[in-house]
Amino acid sequence: MKILVINAGSSSLKYQLMDMEDETVIAKGLCERIGIEGSNLQHRPTGKEQVRIEKPMANHTQAIEIVLAALTDPVHGVISSMDEISAVGHRVLHGGEKFAGSFVITPAVMDVIRENIPLGPLHNPANIMGIEACQQVMPNTPMVAVFDTAFHQSMPPKAFMYAIPKDYYTRLHVRKYGFHGTSHRYVAQRTAEFLGQDAKGLRIITCHLGNGCSMAAIVDGKCMDTSMGLTPLEGMVMGTRSGDLDPAVVGFICEQEHMDVQDCMTMLNKKSGLLGISGFSSDMRDILAAVDEGNADAKLALDMFVYRIRKYIGSYAAAMGGVDAVVFTAGIGENNPRIRELCVEGLGFLGIAIDHEKNAQRGGERDISAPGSTVRTLVIPTDEELVIARDTRDLVCG
Ligand code: AMP
């Protein structure tokens, strides 16, 4: 059984074709500049040469047509016909409060994704375009929506409510939703499997540190708290997002700078975080290189990034009444031993300590805990596409 996983952005479309017999990737790729001059497809068939196809893509439907042509191409293709694709799984950002799991896409499910556009104004419309494009080109293929917010729906009200007049929750659904849910869910599940323990009884802190960063407190395999909020802006210091701040900062800056709220939100989402503090880059690799050259702003950005993570580890340990495992994942979390080391430095009082040699080694899933530490510190590479493909298979094939 072959499943196509789609992650549609406003002008991009990522895809991965998976063979669910052995859960391997047969081909993956990326369409860029959809609807803009210079549209192109980078197609990577496993075991064959990568190709770049420059072709106009006026919309997502044309992009999908070009992807399917590449997948079935006699030279670069990996399947003989699109009938070999049993189902399509779509990543959808915001499921609001209606979706605590993944769902087969029906007109009613589409209505709810549309209803949630105010909560995900940039992503949900793009996700809808991706779904509609696939439906047009593959009208008889079942499709499944997998929501970034779904895993976090198990949070209790004390964790997801904001202490503002309750009416804003009742009328406008203002609350913490959390994102990267598919990643936190995968990593927590793999952690239990890696440790050879039942998820029940395990208290895990997952640290998804990539371009966007979020953390989650997971008890018995269920999310109890997470750092992102109504939008992905809350929580950690990220590449270009500020994370937590006093909401009065928005009012103050708008008033002092005669800035409108929308511009202020753009500043907090796109010009803040590592980029805002360092003044030159949102990429942790650049920040670390500049720290080594003595750049004081880069050092401040790094210190703030790490300090926020340490604070959250402490607060989640307190919220869960202890912690059994701390897990690092995503671009920074998987690849950078120095950041992992800084994040847990001095947390020995919680039982968290890492072995420097194990931490320095590269590889897949691994335990980097120091001997004798009571909390296991792990690195687990995330695989959101695999979760989407599995959910799609399970829902379509029962
Ligand atoms: P992701 O969002 O998970 O794809 O992560 C992408 C981010 O990971 C990039 O923006 C980089 O900042 C960061 N990254 C990737 N590799 C490394 C590395 N070796 N050291 C530090 N940061 C890294």
Image (cartoon, helix red, strand yellow):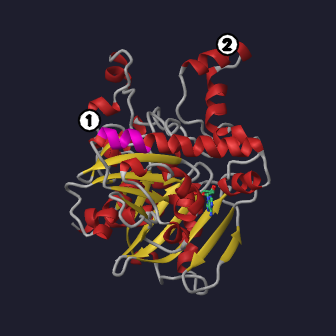
Q: Residue at x 53, y 57 (%)?
A: 340
Q: Quadrant of residue 318?
A: top left
Determine the quadrant in which ligand 1 lies.
Answer: bottom right
Vertical order, 27 against 154 (above or below):
below
Q: Nearer the viewer, residue 134 or 244?
A: 244
Q: Residue at x 69, y 73 (%)?
A: 52
Residue 335 belongs to the span the image colors magenta: no
Q: Nearer the viewer, residue 202 or 210?
A: 202
Marks 1 and 2: in contact by CB < 8 Å? no
Residue 314 belongs to the span the image colors magenta: yes
Could you tell me which secondary element the residue under label 2 belongs to? helix
Residue type at numbered disc 1: Pro
Quarter of the image with the N terminus in it: bottom left
Q: Position of residue 150 (x, y in %)?
A: 34, 47
Residue tagged by mark 2? 255
Could you tell me which secondary element the residue under label 1 belongs to? loop
Disc 2 Cβ-to-ligand 1 distance below 8 Å: no
Which secondary structure type mostly characterizes the magenta part of the structure? helix
Q: Is residue 148 visible?
A: no
Image side of residue 212 versus residue 200, left or right: right
Residue tagged by mark 1? 156
Residue type at numbered disc 2: Glu
Q: Which residues are magenta?
A: 313-319
Q: Nearer the viewer, residue 321 or 392?
A: 321
What crowding class fits label 2: few (fewer than 14 Cα within 10 Å), some (14-19), or many (20 or more)?
Answer: few
The circle on residue 24 is none
Q: Residue at x 72, y 45 (%)?
A: 298
Vertical order, 81 against 293 (above or below):
below
Q: Position of residue 349 (x, y in %)?
A: 39, 47
Q: Position of residue 300 (x, y in %)?
A: 68, 41
Q: Residue at x 47, y 46 (%)?
A: 214
Vertical order, 102 against 69 (above or below):
above
